[in-house]
Image (spheres, rainbow, N blue to C red):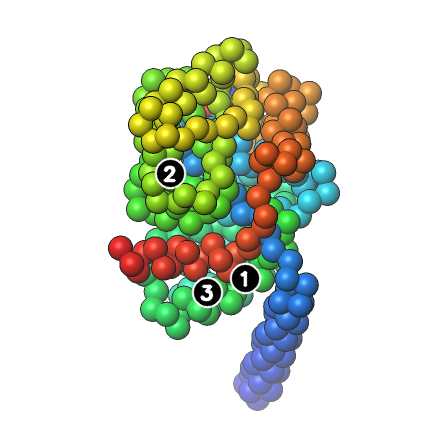
Amino acid sequence: MSKTGPIVDQADKLRRIVSSLRERSEVIIDRAVKKTGKKARLIAVTSGKGGVGKTSLTVNIAIKLSKNGYRVVVIDGDLGLANVEVMLGIVPQYSMYDIINSGLSLSDVIIDGPMGIKFISGGTGVVEMAYLDRRRFDSLLDTLSVLDSYADFILVDTGAGISRSVTKFVLAAREVILVTNSEPTSITDAYAILKIISIHNKECYIKMIANMVESPAEAEDILARINTAAKMFIGAEIKSLGFVKRDPAVSKAVKTQTPFIIGSPKSAAAKSIERIAQRIVYNTEYIREPEGVREFLTRIYLRMNSS
Ligand SMILES: Nc1ncnc2c1ncn2[C@@H]1O[C@H](COP(=O)(O)OP(=O)(O)OP(=O)(O)O)[C@@H](O)[C@H]1O
Ligand SMILES: [Mg+2]
């Protein structure tokens, strides 16, 4: 019995030391970011209709960029089914919810994924973040801004459609990848998203990926159909970032929880992802000046609190 006291004291002391060390390291990282002014390129991946391949594409593009030497963080911004986690076969203990509600730091919440990518689960924090009072929002902002020092790219896998939690990401991001397949409903819903973005997020660079197509011609046809409507009704046009063919390697990857860029690197889908990643990095037509996490989150907050 007499030992309990000192053991508890020691554990407590240790906890305090660890927490003060962590606080100090975060302050240093934060200062470093402010000093270098380095910002991540944040890209939201979305679709009109669900089930068109957002998560598969996000995860594999992230891994390809990481293989090419970039530091990549994937945020699962889809409230629904913890998509990214399932696809990577990882079980994060904490999410953005815990940053907001338990004051956890970024290092508690961010976890390692395959090939050097990092992963953050949004959890219900995705909804909560827009409804915080200014003080709590600023604290979340301080925590998440450190991401700019972790990442060259931040890919946000959003849910599908035009629900509030999806649009807040899509309307705050300056770069959006819109995924569609060739089903008429998927194309119509993609057009609907394009229209909303063109009205409410005029500075956004939005690019399309046609997924699960049978041929390059089918991808061109999808693009042409969206652009016919877009030119006529919104005076805009969407550019293609590439296409991915329907490929059994993709469904196999989902079943085995091993991204196809790792499990089937020679597959047609993997080759397509390589081309898409190259365009994201090198094609000046697709590149946007990185804006960083702070600007992105502030836009979400302001938008939610002004509507
Ligand atoms: N190019 C492809 N070839 C074959 N199957 C594919 C392809 N892309 C996606 N799929 C399959 O389609 C299904 C849906 O993919 P995924 O989960 O990535 O879509 P999603 O848009 O993220 O869906 P949700 O809207 O539910 O989040 C998966 O079973 C996946 O294997
Ligand atoms: Mg998904």
Q: x%, y% of residue 65?
A: 66, 38
Of the residues under marks 3 and 1, which one precedes in the sequence?
Answer: 3
Tell me the residue that label 3 is attached to.
140
Q: Are marks 2 and 3 in contact (CB under 8 Å)?
A: no
Q: x, y percentage for residue 152? A: 64, 49
Image position, residue 239 (x, y; %):
50, 28
Please give left or right for residue 113 compared with residue 93 in the image. right
Q: Amino acid at mark 2?
A: Ser
N-terminal-most mark, 1 or 2: 1
Say which amino acid is labelled 3.
Leu
Residue with the mark numbered 1: 145
Toward the left, the furthest residue is 307
Residue 53, percent across and down?
47, 28
Give 113 or 221, whichever is nearer the viewer. Answer: 221
In this orientation, which residue lies closer to the viewer: 108 or 292?
292
Classify residue 189 as left or right of residue 217: left
- Mark 1, other Cα within 10 Å: few <14 / some 14–19 / many ≥20: many
CA–CA distance in space, label 1 to label 2: 27 Å
Looking at the image, which residue is at 62% across and 67% down?
Answer: 34
Q: Nearer the viewer, residue 280 or 114?
A: 280
- Say which quarter of the image contains residue 183: top left
